Amino acid sequence: MKKIFIANWKMQLAPTEAEKLAQSFVHTFKDTKNEVVVCPDFLSLAAVSKIFKSSDLSLGAQDASAFERGAYTGEVSAFDLSSLGVKYVIIGHSERRTCMEESDKLISGKIKAVSAEKLIPVLCVGENATERKQGKAASVIRGQLKGAFKSLPAKNLRSVVIAYEPIWAIGTGVNCDPLIATRMKTIIKDWCERAGLKKTAILYGGSVKTDNATSFLGKAGYDGLLIGGASLYVDSFKNIVNAKSK
């Protein structure tokens, strides 16, 4: 199975910068054997879509509305994302759960809306530092999975990709020990299998760099990586994508 590498550019680049970086990605990732996904900000999506049109790269979005169409100021519908050629959509990133106070109910609605347009939801789950210290990491993850998938029919869940992102490791430079990452993947995989999701791809995200990528792809057994800061530099992202599992 191909590994999935998702570049989450967040709100780090101006549209002109995103276009320039997208062009570098196209040149760098010709004939790639992996699934390489780039998620620019909404303002840059249309331009990056045109740049990626004849490339081997997949386009992703950093979020989507739970609503199809209507008077929802500031929202972006999954239908419109689909029309731009978006394939993957990040849902429930910890930054949105924290900064925008997104609830499990809203996240569930977004998964449903994205799946209805045949896009692939990338559901992010993860515990914060306090929850880990208190030994609640496993229960937090299971709770997030249960909340996100609650009341969703099986057809909405078959294409879901799950990204484990320990909040305490995102953008902090703090590396998650491969043994911890392995245990968390097992917890997620077991939950998915009990829910009837036996082929769900599980990614890791959180201060991923060239020197630690191999441990998550190899020892921890993840199916790919969700990458933030390191994806803003084509050379570092290339090294991560080309990292061999150990």
Image (cartoon, rainbow, N blue to C red):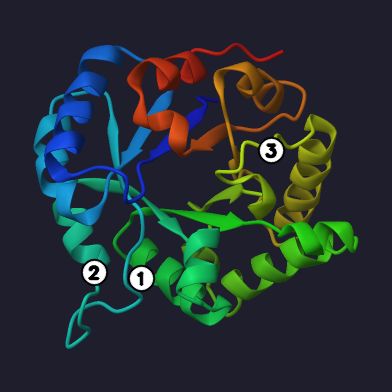
Q: Secondary structure at mark 3?
A: loop
In the image: residue 51, left or right of residue 156: left
Q: Secondary structure at mark 2?
A: loop
Where residue 117 sits: x, y (%)?
29, 62
Q: Secondary structure at mark 1?
A: helix
For the point 57% across and 76% down, the residue is 104
In the image: residue 94, left or right of residue 143: left
* Quadrant hosting residue 113: bottom left
State which tag comes first along the sequence, 3 or 2.
2
Q: Give the residue number, with chain letter if any, for mark 2.
A: 77
Q: Give the residue number, with chain letter if any, for mark 1.
A: 113
CA distance for labels 3 and 1:
34 Å
Q: Amino acid at mark 3?
A: Val
Q: Give the residue number, with chain letter if any, for mark 3.
A: 174
- Residue 210's place in the image compared with 66, above or below, is above
State which tag comes first along the sequence, 3 or 1.
1
In the image: residue 17, left or right of residue 245: left
Q: Nearer the viewer, mark 3 or mark 1?
A: 3
Q: Amino acid at mark 1?
A: Ala
Q: Is residue 30 visible?
A: no
Q: Nearer the viewer, mark 3 or mark 2?
A: 3
In the image: residue 125, left or right of residue 30: right
Q: Nearer the viewer, residue 54 or 104?
A: 104
Where residue 106 sits: x, y (%)?
47, 79
Quarter in which the N terminus is drawn: top right
Where residue 232 sits: x, y (%)?
36, 31
Circles 3, 2 touching at the beta carbon (< 8 Å) = no
Circles 1, 2 touching at the beta carbon (< 8 Å) = yes
- How many numbered circles are shown? 3
